Structures are given as structure tokens and as C-alpha cells.
Amino acid sequence: MNGAAESQVPLPESAAAGAGSAWEREVVDFYIHLAQAFSLPKSVGAIFGVLFASPRPLSLDDIVERLSISKGSASSGLKLLQRVGAVQPTYEPGDRRTRYVPEMSIRRLLTGLLQETVTPHLRRGAEQLESLAPLLDEYPPEERKVLAARLRALNTWQGKAKRLLPFVLGFLGRPLRRAKAASESGTDA
Amino acid sequence: MNGAAESQVPLPESAAAGAGSAWEREVVDFYIHLAQAFSLPKSVGAIFGVLFASPRPLSLDDIVERLSISKGSASSGLKLLQRVGAVQPTYEPGDRRTRYVPEMSIRRLLTGLLQETVTPHLRRGAEQLESLAPLLDEYPPEERKVLAARLRALNTWQGKAKRLLPFVLGFLGRPLRRAKAASESGTDA
DNA sequence: AAGAGAGTTCAGAATTTTCTGAACTTTCTC
DNA sequence: GAGAAAGTTCAGAAAATTCTGAACTCTCTT
């Protein structure tokens, strides 16, 4: 695949714990499943996982190597993750390659994800609802009554959906009550 | 069967407003898009839409006819919708075919949907997390510190996710404050 | 008990999504 | 400026998902 290892250095990190470690495999596996719960491509979950599993930022080539995926996949996966704010690029002076760190705040993670996937669809729907009421005029009164109630329900849903996101984000922003102190240190916004 | 059905009645509803009406098309279109926001098959959205658009319960064959999809699609789509509680079968005495009505409570809709899609994945994740901590022993202290913090964050997320669903459902259960009275009538649980 | 109606199942077709690999752009180094 | 390193893009391949249609089961009717 890639023109690997010019020198004979076997592995870039401590052999037991670096790339390909059990820890890395498990974490990657975990995020692959999580990604599928959100119907995102497996590769996207894997990329986030490998970043999450690494104590140091990784470059695109690191990711390609560790996951054995193509540069194309890695590039577009990273682009998606950046767009939803799930990873951030870091630029170290004197290094040409961009390295990436995973976002650790669940609040920001969810915000970006929902913003990307659900919100645009909801927006579209809101406009459409306006134009629906007049179409009921064709129906006989009895049926129109039933359908008008449904249309009202639809508007109610729309209203609730709009208020739901801020509500959820508020919830995620608060610290867990009754959690052991250790669980909180600097891991969330 | 009831003797009325076999006669030569051209359409089961008033021609202008029944199957194929503008109202039906718009509603179906709306739910097709909504389905895609949840990454469900378009046909599933269309089936829910056609039920939502109809003032009376529809049978599998009604759906097949109005959406021009195969019986197989309709059958499995209905099955999925029933499983998540988005439609309910109705059995009228003296009629052999099952007819379906859409669920109108957004609370129940979302409960079922999340139960079906997200919850099993979260469950799976919880077990896996337990076994992760020991794998960090291989890492040098400096790196282990970073990764241990991430593992704690992961546990925090898990905890929040667990509490989030009931919280959301609570929100959806309450009536909208400051909404005009008309928006509320009997449309939600 | 034969036949019709209602609905399910599932193998393969059609469609959509995801991934690869090679060509390309841009930026840095010598 | 030539060459190399880093990263993007995109056409086509591969994989996954969804849909169809025909065969099948079950139940009710006569």
C-alpha cells in the first residue's frame, strides 16, 4: 500500500501499547458501533476511535496506517468529523502535517452531530407545513375535521422539536449530580 | 366480507380529496424526508405518511395501491412501524383485513424509535467499557494519565446518555407553554 | 375439502452508500 | 525551479441496503 518504513524501525511507539494495541482495537471497535447507531459510516467511527485511543494527536497518514484504509477515505472521514466539530486539527510549529485531536465534550459532539444531520431536515419541514392547510378544503367536513387535528398535531411536533435541542444541550452542559468527583476533571465543557 | 365492496364504485373516497390528492402527496413527501433524517428507508416514511394523510385507517392493499410499492415492501415497512409503535393495527368486526392508524403522540413515537435504534447500541457499549481500564497498564505513566482521563470521560458520557432519554421524554410529555389553545386539543399524550 | 383472501418470507434485482486508488493541487525545501 | 511531501478530489469498484415478485402459510368461506 503506502511506501512504508524506509528505515527498519519496527514500530513508532512503545511496542506493547501503541498502534495495534488491545486498547486501540477495543476503542476503535466501540466507536465503530457507536457510529452505526447514528448511521454514520464505519470508517468515520474508526477514525474517531483511533484518535480517541491515542495519547497524542495523529496525522492523516498515521490513521491510514493504523486502520488500513485508503487515503481518500481517511481524508473525507476527517473532513466530516471536522465539519461536525468532533475532531480538531492541531498545528505544531515546524511540522508540515496536520494532526488531529478528538473533541472530548459530549455537549459539543452532540451539538455538531445534530446540527449536521437532523436540523436541516427540520428546517425544510417547517416551511412545507405552512402550505398544507388549504389543501384540506377539498375534503368533506367530517374528514376535514380529523385531518385538521392531525395538521395541528404536526405543528405541535414541530414546535416541540425546535425547543428540544436547546433543552437537551442544557442537560448535557450540567455536571452529573451525585457522581464521584473523579469523573468530572476537565473532561466536559 | 361486507356485501357493499364488490360493486362498481370507482373510487373508495371522494375523488378530489382521496387517494392521490395534493394533500396526500404533500404529507407523504414530508414524511419521506423526515424518515431520511432518521436514516430510515423512504418507503417507511411514505407508509406512515399515507396513513397520516388518510382520515380513515388503511389496509396493506390500500397502501400498496396508493404508493405503488410492492406488497413485500409494504408488509415489512408496516412491521417496522408497528415494532417501533408508530402505527397501530385496528380490527373491525366483520372485516378480515387489518387496517392501520398512525400514532399521534410524539412522545410515544420518539420513545419507540429511540428504543429501536439507539438503545441497543448504548447497552452493548456499557458492558464493553468495563473491560477497558486494565488495558491501559501497558502504557507509560505519562500517556496512561491522558488515556485514563479519556476513559473517565467515556463513562461520563455513558452516564449522561442513560439519563438523557427519560429527561427528553419528560419534556415531550408536557404541554407547550404559551401555545394557543387550539394547538393542543387531543393530539398528544 | 377446495378455494379465495390476507399477509409473510426470501432470493435475487435495483439502488444507494461507502471505499479505493490514481491523478491532481498546493506548499514547502533545496 | 525541480522535486517531494501533504492532502484533496473524483470516477469507478465494492459493499450494503432496500425493493420486488413469486411462492408460501394461515384462516375463513362455502
Image (cartoon, coloured by chain):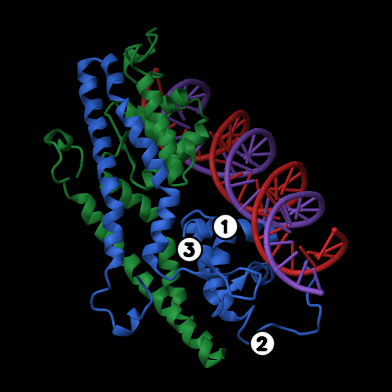
Chain colours: A blue, B green, C purple, D red
Q: Chain of mark 3?
A: A
Residue denoted by label 2: A15
Q: Quadrant of residue A75?
A: bottom right
Point 33% across, 36% down: residue: A126
The one nearer the camera, A108 or B71, is: A108
Residue at the (58%, 75%) spot, across then down: A92
What amino acid is found at the position of numbered circle 2 in the picture? Ala
* Nearer to me, B85 or B155: B155
Residue drawn at 40 percent across, 30 percent down? B28
Tell me whether marks 3 and 2 sit on the same chain.
yes
Which residue occupies the foreground of this view, A58 or A132?
A58
Are the residues flagged by discs 1 and 3 from a single subunit? yes
- Measured as percent of width and height from the top left, residue B162 is found at 32, 66
Q: Earlier in the sequence, mark 3 or mark 2?
A: 2
- To the question of a shared chain for discs 1 and 2, the answer is yes
What residue does disc 3 label? A86
